[in-house]
Amino acid sequence: MTTLAQRTTTAEAQAGLGFHLEALSLGYSRDLVLREIELEVVPGEVLVIVGSSGSGKSTLLRSLAGLLRPYSGRVLAGGAEVAATSGDRAMVFQDDGLLPWRTVRRNVELPLRIRRIPRRERAAAAHAWIGRVGLAGSEDKLPRELSGGMRQRVQLARALVGAPRAVLMDEPFGALDAQTRAQMQRLLLDVLRDTRATVVFVTHDVDEALLLADRVVVLERQGIRSVIEVPGPRDPDADRGELRARILEEL
Amino acid sequence: MGARRWSGVVKVASLLAAAGLWQLLTVTDARLWLTFDRLPTLDEIAGEAARRLATSVFYLDLLQSLVRILTGFGLAAVAGLAVGIAVARSPHTRDVVLPLLEALRPIPAIALVPVAILLFPTDEQGIVFITFVAAFFPIMVSTRHAVRALPTLWEDAVKTLGGGRRHVLWNVVLPGILPGLFGGLSVGMGVAWICVISAEMISGEFGVGYRTWQSYTLVDYPAVIVGMITIGLLGWLTSAAIELIGRKATRWLPRAEGSTA
Ligand SMILES: Nc1ncnc2c1ncn2[C@@H]1O[C@H](COP(=O)(O)OP(=O)(O)OP(=O)(O)O)[C@@H](O)[C@H]1O
Ligand SMILES: [Mg+2]
């Protein structure tokens, strides 16, 4: 267990990758989706992105991951220009990103395998994470044998097991029932308290945004409409009526 | 009676009817427009089969043909897979290799027999070469299409987990193309048999194809039919093996639960 534990502490020591977006334009072939946006993602914060369908939330996340080259402008992660993908910036995909030929266990172990972490350690870490997302007992199932919500939780475990410095999450809890969703939100907050990883989180749910976010970015076609600070300790019972109304108005 | 069992009964009955018709035509030496008078009856064929099965030459032939096809096909599977992936994933390789392959593809492998004879020191290598060429193209083409049809999502997932090109190849491309690849392997095995048998008939000593053709020149018609049946069985067995391995390797494919497929 030592290697992974050490790895985790190293990750903690350097926790939280900051992002810096400079005059960033993103698009596909001819269409520009986002035009010259400027944004700072502070190390260790939870930045939630909301915006109507097609406003470019997934596009923005893909560029932070290094999956989409900017049309113009720059993306810096930890001060260095993002030129490619990295295990430091794990992503939870909106569509099911699990490898269908790998069991739950082997999907979750994948990032550790890529880092050549020894087999026994890999198995232990994967087992622990599968338990944390509430899927103990489903280790040997194939993705096709799981429900959509279960698959999303496997993706969550797979993204977090390698202790990345930033987690990019594209509507990760979209397919979950209210109760499991609340559980996963709590799990995510717990994990973040430990690792201080930076999170960029896309959601359509304003309440989820208010619960998780340090700041909420409202995206509209072509750009950022507004950035809203969410003050105070994260507390599911806090009254956020006023903020809520403001975000809904911006949307 | 279950639908399944009924379908089994129909299958057996259909085979029996065909065999009965053959027997009727050959016993009566039917000379319609087709002439059956020189073709052997079922009991002659069975007698010949029993005699052949007791000789060691039969098994030597079998072994020889199997070695040839498995060598040629095995090499074609490895090369077809490698070239198919390289051509689909590297534009540079595609520009260098593809025009050449597209120029060679329309030539039926069996037309390469003269070149093979000139090129290789022994007939044996020539036959394997022709088998290789025949199986290579369907495997390469199906690999190429399967790679191109892969959703980018899986590759993106592995990359964002820290994987590089090699990880993508091992963890996404190779497993992801298996369903398409096995289609190509099946077709490749089919044409490989055609070419092995034809090449054996043209050149070579030993081999099921050689023996069958030799029996014909010796006017031993029951032996010709036994040879044909042997070839058919070998082809069926190798296809069935590929089908079985393919199913095992692609168990993860979504399937309607409880469907018979
Ligand atoms: N691969 C692609 N090729 C071309 N255009 C694309 C591609 N992906 C997205 N787009 C376009 O970019 C725009 C933004 O898409 P994006 O997926 O980022 O939206 P989104 O905000 O994530 O929407 P949703 O809430 O529905 O997930 C859309 O107009 C879409 O048509
Ligand atoms: Mg999206």
Image: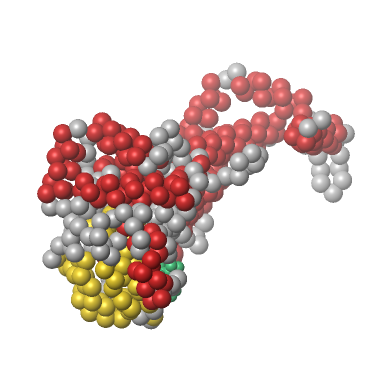
Direction from residue B47 to residue B101 in the image, left or right:
left
From this viewpoint, is residue B200 visible? no
Quarter in which the C terminus of chain B is drawn: top right
Viewer-side residue, B192 vs B138 = B138
Farthest residue to the top: give it. Answer: B54
- Of B113 and B232, the residue lying toward us: B232
Image location of residue A204, percent across then percent down = 42, 64
Picture residue at 51% right of the left edge, 41% below the top: A145
Residue A193 point in image, percent of width and height: 23, 49
In x, y percent, where is residue A175?
47, 54
Where residue B227 sits, quadrant-wise, is: top right
Q: Is residue B9 left or right of residue B152?
A: right
Direction front: furthest residue? A239
Q: Residue at x 66, y 20 (%)?
A: B50
Residue displayed at 72% across by 24% down? B46
- On screen, A19 above or below A89? below
- Residue B249 image point, x, y percent: 47, 39
Can see residue B190? yes
Image quadrant of ligand 1? bottom left
Which quadrant holds residue A17? bottom left
Image quarter where the N terminus of chain B lies is top right
- Total marks shown come to 0
The image's colouring method is secondary structure
Name the foreground residue: A171 vs A233: A233
The residue depicted at 66 percent of the width and 25 percent of the height is B49
